[in-house]
Amino acid sequence: MDRILGIDYGRKRVGVAVSDPLQIFASALETVHSAKIIEYIKNYTQNEKLVRIVVGYPMNLNNKPAEAAADVDVFLKQLAKAFPDIPVVKEDERFTSCLAMKAMVDGGVKKSDRRVKGAVDKVSAAIILQTYLDRMQNSMPQQPIEKK
């Protein structure tokens, strides 16, 4: 089944999330060391068909790229080279770390578990991907409801 991969890229760690086959829901998948993310995606595509990769893109409040965007730009070039047949989309990632932490607190995740490096990264990736999926779902024309 066709899936979409969501990525929260960082210099040290990369949060990874994946859509369900119907591309409605995003689920946190894993946190991977940034040096191994291309290899991880290659391994993942051996078992699952990816139709798109959504990468969180760091933006400032003034709608200009944040300082970390330079690192993401390098990563985007690596993705394009490694996966030329898979479209890559940038998604604004403002506030995703805060939202991820809040989601973990609201979900009852223990404080000690929230401190685990990478826990927030994969939840952030899921939020980035879910934001993209929701926007795509809302932009699709709705089927009229049949009247009886």
Image: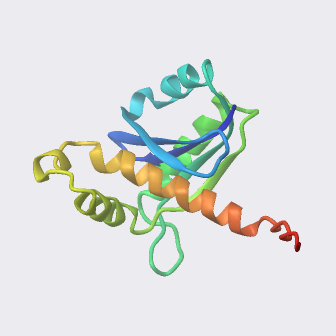
Q: Position of residue 44 (x, y in %)?
A: 55, 24
Q: In the image, what residue occupies the spot 39% across and 68% down? A: 95
Q: Is residue 42 above or below residue 96?
A: above
Q: Position of residue 97 (x, y in %)?
A: 34, 60
Task: Name the image colouring.
Answer: rainbow
Which quarter of the rendering shows the C terminus?
bottom right
Q: In the image, what residue occupies the spot 40% across and 43% down? A: 15
User: Could you say which is closer to the camera, residue 116 or residue 33?
Assistant: 116
Of all residues shown, which one is farthest toward the bottom? 62
User: Could you say which is closer to the camera, residue 67 or residue 113?
Assistant: 113
Q: In the image, what residue occupies the spot 40% across and 29% down? A: 35
Q: In the image, what residue occupies the spot 28% across and 65% down? A: 102
Q: Is residue 2 above or below residue 48?
A: below
Which quarter of the rendering shows the N terminus?
top right
Q: Is residue 35 above or below residue 74?
A: above
**49 displayed left or right of 61:** right
Of all residues shown, which one is farthest toward the front? 148
Quarter where residue 45 is shown = top right
Quarter where residue 3 is shown = top right
